[in-house]
Amino acid sequence: MNVSDSRTEGRCVHLVTLECKDEEHASRCIEALASYGRPDALAFNCVSYEFGLKEGTSNTVYIIEHWRQWQDLNALLNEKVVPALPIYNQLLKRPFDPAKDTVRVRLSDA
């Protein structure tokens, strides 16, 4: 699937910021996202799941997810993410706060 396909099919975009304690913790976070985050998201019908370091930093990880509907994301959060928060929080400067660390955007059809 190419990028234009994910934009057409996944109009719901979820942006996540994970500010890790340091470069080593960011590296471990990226490994966890590759091993668990992406496969879990895809199992919950995520159209596209990408992540990487914020340009110019060594400890801030961004996740960009495309979804067809928010209900699939909500199911993932409830069943997989919330139970794993204690593990992820060990890598972060402060505990993960969805209100501060995530943004939901519905892309325009125009």
Image (tube, rainbow, N blue to C red):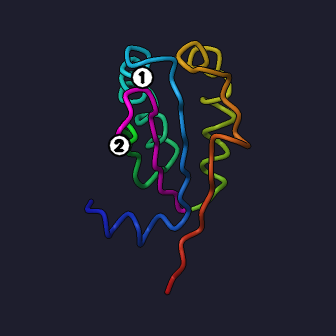
Q: Is most of the magenta stretch helix, strand or loop?
A: strand
Tag 1: amino acid: Ala
Is residue 28 rendered to the left or right of residue 97? Answer: left
Depth order, front residue of 55/40: 55
Quarter of the picture holding the N terminus? bottom left
Q: Where is residue 53 in the image (x, y as percent from the top left)?
A: 37, 36
If you read the primary sequence from the N terminus, does the residue marked by circle 2 or circle 1 appear first?
A: 1
Is residue 35 rendered to the left or right of residue 70? Answer: left
In this rendering, is residue 62 above or below 106? Answer: above
Is residue 21 rendered to the left or right of residue 84? Answer: left
Instruction: Tell me which segment is drawn in magenta.
Output: 56-68
Give the number of the disc on residue 18.
none
Q: Residue at x 65, y 22 (%)?
A: 94
Q: Quadrant of residue 81?
A: top right
Q: Which residue is drawn at 54% across and 78% down?
A: 108
Tag 2: amino acid: Glu
Other residues around mark 2 within 10 Å, as few (<14) / some (14–19) / many (≥20): few
For numbered disc 2, what is the local secondary structure?
loop
Q: Where is residue 14 in the image (x, y as percent from the top left)?
A: 56, 52
Q: Where is residue 20 in the image (x, y as percent from the top left)?
A: 51, 23
Q: Position of residue 87 (x, y in %)?
A: 58, 14
Q: Name the residue under label 2.
A: 55
In this rendering, is residue 79 above or below 8? Answer: above
Counting the numbered discs, the total is: 2
Mark 2 or mark 1: which is in front?
Answer: 2
For numbered disc 1, what is the local secondary structure?
helix
Q: Name the residue under label 1.
A: 26
Task: Please identify the residue farthest to the right as the structure is shown.
Answer: 99
In this rendering, is residue 8 above or below 97? Answer: below
Q: Report if residue 58 lies within the magenta region.
A: yes
